Image (cartoon, rainbow, N blue to C red):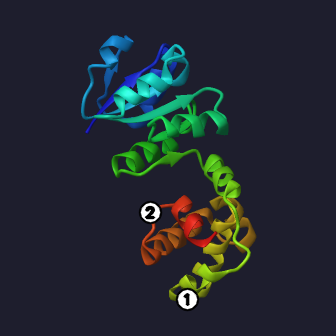
Amino acid sequence: MQIVLYSDDILLIEHWEQSLQQNSLLVDTLEELKTIKNSLIIINYSACEGQCETLLRDLSITNKVLVLHRTPNIHIAKHLLKHGARGYGNALMRDHFIVSAVKTIKENMIWLYPEFTSMLIADLPLKEEDNNLDKLEILSGREKEVALLLRDALTYKDIAKELDITPRTVKAHAAKIYKKLSVKDRIALALLLR
């Protein structure tokens, strides 16, 4: 899948290209952007010129769109996801986050900056009864601990501190949990358990 970059800020384009370390198509105008098909498009939020909703509606029919923003916030994230964005994050985030976002979106999943994922999970209502906890019986003891902390909206880093393990180990446990419970990500897990 071709990656297309659109921004009014050349420094952001350079940062994204360096992070991705692969050939990308650079698009200079909104008109040119609207002609793109079957691609993963990375857009600088401020370059939408106030037309992000319309642009997302049009582009998301045949493309997957990641919107990056210099000053991201959860309200804009929710709004853009409703209008077809497949991901949202900080325009200046570290390389591994950009690579992760692209990989996740290519796999037909939604990607959010980790703190935003935790915020969305925290907004989900928690059921009074724990009927869904019986689903955790197929998990190991440590996986149950991790699953419950993920349900409670903790980040991988927070879980690592809580359990005195590395964030990488938390990620490994999370991957096993998702596979065993047939969910794709933290939000799906939270929906299953909340």
Q: On the image, which quarter does residue 144 sit in? A: bottom right
Q: Is residue 87 above or below residue 67?
A: below
| Separation of marks 2 and 1 at Cα, in angstroms | 19 Å
- If the image is split into quadrants, where does the N terminus sit? top left
Q: How many marks?
A: 2
Q: Secondary structure at mark 1?
A: helix
* Residue 111 % position (x, y): 49, 47
Q: Nearer the viewer, residue 50 or 185?
A: 50
- Place of residue 100 in the rendered image (x, y in percent of width and height, measured from the top left): 45, 47
Residue at 57% in and 30% down? 92
- Does the image show residue 61? yes
Check disc 2 and give the amino acid type: Lys
Q: Is residue 6 left or right of residue 147?
A: left
Determine whether 114 is above or below 55 in the image. below
Classify 180 as above or below 117. below
Give the quarter of the image for residue 86: top left
Residue at figure coordinates x 57%, y 35% from the top left: 79
Where does residue 73 sit, x and y in percent of width and height?
A: 67, 35
- Kind of residue indicated by mark 1: Glu
Answer few, some or many: residues within 10 Å of disc 2's Cα (few below 14, many 20 plus, some between 14 and 19). some
Q: Which mark is residue 137?
A: 1
Q: Secondary structure at mark 2?
A: loop
Residue drawn at (34%, 46%) of the image = 106
**In the rendered image, which residue does mark 2 sit on?**
184
Q: Earlier in the sequence, mark 2 or mark 1?
A: 1
Q: Left or right: 175 with respect to 187?
A: left
Label 1: few (<14), some (14–19) or many (≥20) C-alpha neighbours in 10 Å: few
